[in-house]
Structures are given as C-alpha cells and as structure tokens.
Image (spheres, rainbow, N blue to C red):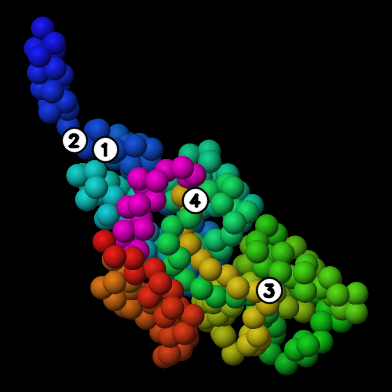
Amino acid sequence: MRSILAALLLIAFIATPLSAQELTGTLLQVQKSGKIKIGYRQYQPPMSSLNKNGTPEGYSIDLCQQIVAGVEDKIGKNITIEYVPVTAEERFQALSDNRIDILCGATTKTLSRGELVDFTQLTFVTGASFMTLKGTDIMNNFNGKKIGVVEGTTTYTALKELFDDPEIKAEIILVKTSSDGINALEKGEIDAISADQVVLIGLALKLGHPEKFSILPNLISYEPFALAVRRNDADFRLVADRVISHLYRTKQILPIYNKWFGQFSSQMPSAFEAVIKINATPE
C-alpha cells in the first residue's frame, strides 16, 4: 500500500509543471499577471527620465529591460512592461505596497535602506556634487548661499553633514525633484543644486543649454547605485543579479554605458571599471 501511495505521489510530482514548483514571489506574480511593473523617477537623467515622446529612458531603464528578458526566460513566457513613476519619498514604499516590482533609477545602496528593500549587484558608482549657473562663486565658499537638494536622498544626508560645521553658514532648500531644483536655480531662488554628479550632468545636457551651468569637480559623498527589489525575494533578485553579472562578464555593458555616458567623457571612470570587475560574478 505504501509503495502504491509513493508511486502516486511521484506521478503527481512529475505531472506538476516544473516552473510552478520553482517560481515564488515576484516571479510567480509576474507569470500569473503577464506583467512586470518598473518603477522609475522621471527627472534623473541619464539614469531615468522621459524622452520627448513621454517614454521612460535611461541607463537604468536599459538595464531593467535586460532584466525583463531574463525574467521571460525564467518563467517561459513573454510579459508586458508597465512603467510606474515614483518620487524619492515614496519609491521604497512603492515596492512594499506592490505598486512596483523593481526600482530602476539613481538609487544609492545603503545598509539602512536594506532594512526596507533588497538591492541587486551594483549598477553604477558616482558621488554628490553641486551645479550652479555659470559665473557663480561657490567653490569652497558656501557662506550665505542657498543650496537646493531633493528631500529623502543620500545627497541630503551628505549636505547636512557637510554643513554641520558651525563656520559654514549655508541654507539647505528642500525640493521635490531635481527638475524643481533646476527651475529654482534658473530663477535665482537658490545658488546651487546638489545631487549625484552624473545626474547633474544629465540634467544640464537634457535642458539643451549646458553652457549655462557649472558643475563642481569635487565629490562630497560616495554613491554606489543598485536596483531595488522587495525584501526577501531571493529568486527574483537572483534573476536580476544574473543578468547584471552577465552584462559585466561579456562586456555587453559597454555599449549601454557609452550610449548614456559616452557623450560626457570618452574615458570611463576607474571606479566604474572596478564595479564591472568586482560584480562580474561567475555563473
């Protein structure tokens, strides 16, 4: 009797689709819905922004599209992409609330944020800097200046630490988006805007008149970028990590990098070269 029962259980196990046994969390949800929801910030070029047609684009968006292809291979079916705009304040909650499945933008990986979300392999590295209108005297001279920064970002934290020095009399002005900061800068409401240096470069180029602005060369923070996913969803994170590592190992990351950063500089930063080598995890 026991042998018959064991045989029936084995038949039932074999009859169950392998994918249904393997898929969990986000992967199972995407397989059932046929859709994956990509969260992005609209004003963070060249990492993520809207093009002239109102379509999301950018370095992180391209990486996430590669990850979508990896998800399709994993679940064995084509899926559609739903792009969901999020703000700096709500982006992590959007993952927890299941409004998005992956956050694709300019998000710094930190240990404290690891209490809210999980992160993929590193996707980029940069640091916070300042952008002013051309001719503004701000280099090592922040006294009396108004500095705009997006609330809820690591740049805001770095600014607070920088201006904790009682000898520096600068005022931090909180803005909702980097685009709002640029508008305030052009109107003369602030003297500078602080954000990740690569984002400042992207904003200046996207406006179409980069000659109006100056970006300080010095960095005030270290910002390792990664994509964020829901906590404790190891299977989905592994798919993303496999795609990112494959891009690094095969050097397929280079045309993506050149597409979005080649216009800034012909030489790749040594820090990003290190990111490629360190995160080219063997299969």
Q: Quadrant of residue 210?
A: bottom right
| Residue type at numbered disc 3 | Ser
Q: Is residue 236 rendered magenta in the image?
A: yes
The residue at the point 30 percent across, 34 percent down is 32
Q: Amino acid at mark 1?
A: Glu
Up-down relation of residue 223 to residue 137 (above or below): above
- Residue range corresponding to the magenta coloring: 230-245
Q: What residue did someone put label 3 on?
A: 194
Which one is closest to the eye, mark 3 or mark 2?
Answer: 2
The numbered disc on residue 22 is 1
Viewer-side residue, 164 vs 33: 164
Instruction: Give left or right: position of 232 versus 152.
Output: left
Which badge, 3 or 2, is on the more N-terminal residue?
2
Residue 65, placed above or below residue 76:
below
Q: Disc 4 residue type?
A: Asp
Q: Secondary structure at mark 2?
A: helix
Residue 129 spot, x, y in % from top left: 65, 78
Disc 2 and disc 1 in contact, CB within 8 angstroms: yes
Reading the chain from its start, which is encountered first: label 4 or label 1?
1
x, y percent for residue 147: 76, 73
- Residue 132 appears in the figure: yes
Q: Amino acid at mark 2?
A: Leu
Marks 4/3: CA–CA distance? 26 Å
